[in-house]
Amino acid sequence: MSDRDSQVLLGRISGVFGLKGWVKVFSFTDPRKAILDYQPWLLGPQQKAVRVLQGQPHGKTLIAALPGVTTPEQAQALVGQEIWVPRADLPSAGERTWYWSDLEGLLVRNREGIDLGVVSQLLETGANDVLVVQGERQRLIPFVLDQVVQEVNLVEKRLLVDWHEED
């Protein structure tokens, strides 16, 4: 199992907040503030383990204070870094629910047996989540269980969808 298989991506540092080195956090968790409950965060390519000192919602985003980050310049150096946590520290996804990171990289095949591509990312649209599928062209496929997404098979690393090749 690779390091990335034993970790789940929960968010990203998206900006700087204030003059004391706090960072803005874009969270993929639901609810968004749940990211603050999971410790430690593994930041950046070096996977530096960091325990959040303080964190809270602020408008439509979250803000957090991290150890050793006390100036806006230090916080700026962290912008863009992904926030991962050990999979073992998270609750199981449950029946018919999945972590987005588990869906990324899965082969997408339609009911006619045609491979449409691989899930490169997911988007939250408000109405429903959307699979971004990269193949011979990019497709945006709604992640609507039983209507569009017929089967999720993590063992075989594939999704079965009711989606026409031309769509």
Image: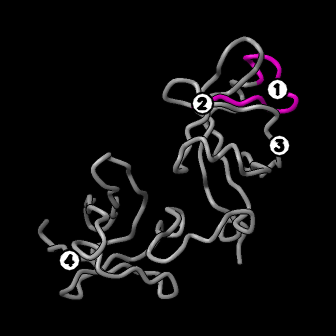
Under tag 4, what secondary structure? loop
Q: Nearer the viewer, mark 2 or mark 4?
A: 2
The amino acid on which the numbered mark 3 sits, given as a three-letter code, is Arg
Disc on the earlier residue, 1 or 2: 2
In space, the residues marked 2 and 3 are separated at their CA atoms by 17 Å
Q: Residue at x 26, y 58 (%)?
A: 140
Is residue 126 shown in magenta? Answer: no
The amino acid on which the numbered mark 1 sits, given as a three-letter code, is Val
State the residue position of label 2.
57
In space, the residues marked 1 and 2 are separated at their CA atoms by 19 Å
**How is the rendered protein coloured?**
one colour
Residue 16, horizontal then vertical, whole percent: 64, 22
Q: Quadrant of residue 79?
A: top right
Is residue 72 shown in magenta? Answer: yes
Vertical placement of 125 versus 91: above or below? above
State the residue position of label 3.
51
Residue at the extreme top: 19
Sort mark 1 into few (<14), some (14-19) or many (20+) by Cα contacts within 10 Å. some
State the residue position of label 4.
162
Q: What are the residue bounds of the magenta stretch?
A: 62-74
Q: Nearer the viewer, residue 43 or 53?
A: 53
State the residue position of label 1.
69
In space, the residues marked 3 and 4 are separated at their CA atoms by 43 Å
In space, the residues marked 4 and 1 are separated at their CA atoms by 48 Å
Under tag 3, what secondary structure? loop
